Amino acid sequence: MVFRLLRRPRPAPTSWLPQPIPFHRTLIPPTDLYHHPALVAQRAMDAGRPKRVRASINYVEPTELDEDIVDDEVLDESAVTVASDDLPTDTEDVTTVVSDSDSGSDQEFTTDKRKLKAQQKKKQAKKSKKVKKVKEVPFRFMDLPPEIRVMIYKACLVESAKDLTYITNKTNGRDIFRGSMKRSQIGNGWGGWRYKIKHDRHDVERTPLLPVILRINKAIRDEAIPYLYAQPFHFATTHTFQLFFGRLSPSNRMLLRNITIDGWTDTKHARIKDAQIIFSLLISATNIRSIHIARRAYAASDGPNYYGRGSGFTNEPHNFWRDIQYWADAMDAAHGKGAAKAALSFTKLCFGSPRELENEDEVVDKREKEFWAQMKFTEKEE
């Protein structure tokens, strides 16, 4: 509130007039009624005139949240078709393809991203018709039928392409791995052959084994381990067989069925004199059905008497029988008479050189007959 000061003039003194009133100031309220306190308080209590309503404009691109809101609206519109009787049953295929000829004809053309997204969702909802989803429910492996479990065991533990071949990394190495001995010529072929270790890790015919399945539990191990040791095993050298067999438990040794021991010769890889060690170990594996002996030649003329060694199977049949006698007795005691003779076999190369075999020399058959005649195996009773 603004106040103005007014100055009033003093009247002229007269003798006959009373004494004048002394000069003083008087406050006169202003004539501006808009700022009057009563009017100002009244205006504060009023609601005022309404604001102008404007349409909201969004200058931001639609986000995923906006699309989800639109999708919810579309799903609410198509919720009527959820309870249709055309839903596939459990025995029907849930991947049935619906034709596109009856969809999209009643939709208007638009360039709005939100509307296009809504139309696409609506079209997919019509196609699927709320098809039931198959839930992935875990199952117990031991609840499978036995024949299916056997198929899984064989796929994980059995070599299906060839014999399971093992070899050591060196002549007297301690590491055993899957591999074989590859033969190559020396010079122009007149110098003989040499053998090199060949790994099977890059062999395309190699079946990768998964023995980790034996560590799942004891029940699976007891079912699966016979399929691992019942398959044919091929050992490139006698030293490889000794390392492999020495690491087996007594129960696993009894699971072996067919083995081939290669490399019998009088060189550094395997010697005929190792027969006593080999067959002494085999006494604890009497369930073996087949033991095949294969010799390795280093030249075309490499036979039992090559270079005057005189220590082959043919030259010393008596000593060989002394080396395997206790094994033969154990086999006959476990499976009856004649079991040891039926399980043991030799390749033709053990009784002749490659050149003699190529020429079909009769001396090879003669040596073989003389060798078996000096073996004192018991015959099977008829």
Image (spheres, rainbow, N blue to C red):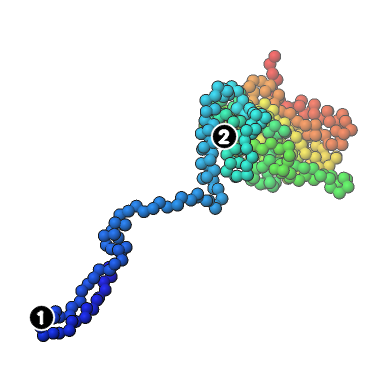
Residue 241, picture quadrant = top right
* Residue under numbered circle 1: 18
**Residue at screen point 10% across, 83% down:** 16
* Residue 356 x, y percent position in the rendering: 86, 34
Left or right of 350 on screen, residue 256 = left
What kind of element bears circle 1?
loop
Are the residues flagged by discs 1 and 2 in contact, CB closer than 8 Å? no
Among all residues in the image, which is located at the extreme front? 16
**Residue at screen point 54% across, 24% down:** 84
The quadrant of the image that shows the C terminus is top right
* Residue 95 x, y percent position in the rendering: 62, 29
* Residue 281 x, y percent position in the rendering: 63, 34
* Residue 59 x, y percent position in the rendering: 54, 53
For the residue pair 59 and 189, the one nearer the viewer reads as 59
Which label sits in the foreground, 1 or 2? Answer: 1
* Residue under numbered circle 2: 214
Give the distance between the C-alpha atoms of the residues marked 1 and 2, in whole angstroms: 137 Å
Callout 1 amino acid? Pro
> How dense is the environment of label 1, judged by Cα within 10 Å: few (below 14), some, or many (20 and up)?
few
For the residue pair 136 and 303, the one nearer the viewer reads as 136
Q: Is residue 266 visible?
A: no
For the residue pair 24 and 58, the one nearer the viewer reads as 24
For the residue pair 260 and 84, the one nearer the viewer reads as 84
Callout 2 amino acid? Leu
> How dense is the environment of label 2, judged by Cα within 10 Å: few (below 14), some, or many (20 and up)?
some
